[in-house]
Image: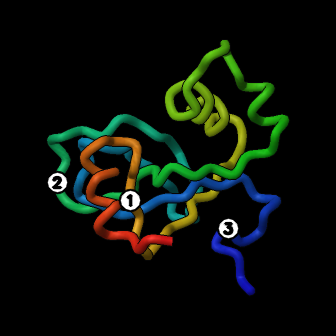
Amino acid sequence: MVSLWGDLRVQSILCKRTTSLNLYDYIDYSSDGYVRSISRSSVSFKGEQYVNAGAVLLASNSILSYTPHIPCSLEHDLLPAIISDIPLKMITNPGLSIDIGLPETLTAATSLLPVI
């Protein structure tokens, strides 16, 4: 069985392609698939781009050594600092991805996903 995450020793972030850039953090990446930066998307951008799909694989010592304060935000406080020092591999998700962190998308998810 091949893991979606590939080599679990490589710190990674799950990304998806979307045109809804105003809802997600934009991923700027190099040609070899490593993240250069993550930033709040610009609503003026047109077309599909990769965005943060909400799952990150990090070594526990990465999280602790980059925590600027408690509480903090993974997306806005930790990831920018980590990316500047540690390679973060971009893993793409070709399948269905639903952000359930917003009330309207949580409601939509209830009709798109089967009951378990």
Q: Residues within 10 Å of mark 2 (few under 14, many from 20)?
A: few
Mark 1, secondary structure of its residue: loop
Viewer-closest of 105 and 68: 105
What residue is shown with label 1? 98
Name the amino acid, label 1: Ile
How far across and down, in percent of the image, does residue 45 sit?
Answer: 19, 47
Q: Secondary structure at mark 3?
A: loop
Quarter occupied by residue 39: top left
Distance from label 2 to label 1 (Cα)?
A: 21 Å
Q: Position of residue 58 (x, y in %)?
A: 73, 46
Dividing the picture into quadrants, the one containing residue 14 is bottom right
Q: Nearer the viewer, residue 63 or 34?
A: 63
Say which of marks 2 and 3 sits in front. Answer: 3
- Determine whether label 1 and label 3 are within 8 Å by CB: no
Question: Which numbered dot is residue 71?
Answer: none
Q: Is 81 displayed left or right of 75 in the figure?
A: right
Does the residue at mark 2 contact the one at mark 1 (Cβ under 8 Å)? no
Query: Which class describes the residues within 10 Å of circle 1: few (<14), some (14-19), or many (20+)?
Result: some
Residue in front for this viewpoint, 111 or 79:
111
Tell me: 104 left or right of 106. left
Dot label at residue 46: 2
Mark 2 or 3 closer to N-term? Answer: 3
Pinpoint residue 32: horizontal percent, then vertical percent: 58, 65
**Residue at the front extreme of this rendering:** 115
Who's the residue at 51% across and 64% down the image? 31
Q: Secondary structure at mark 2?
A: loop
The amino acid type found where label 3 is placed reads Trp
Vertical arrangement, residue 83 with respect to residue 20, above or below: above
Disc 3 target residue: 5
For the image shown, how many numbered marks are present on the structure? 3
Find residue 91 and report its horizontal and vertical position in percent.
57, 64
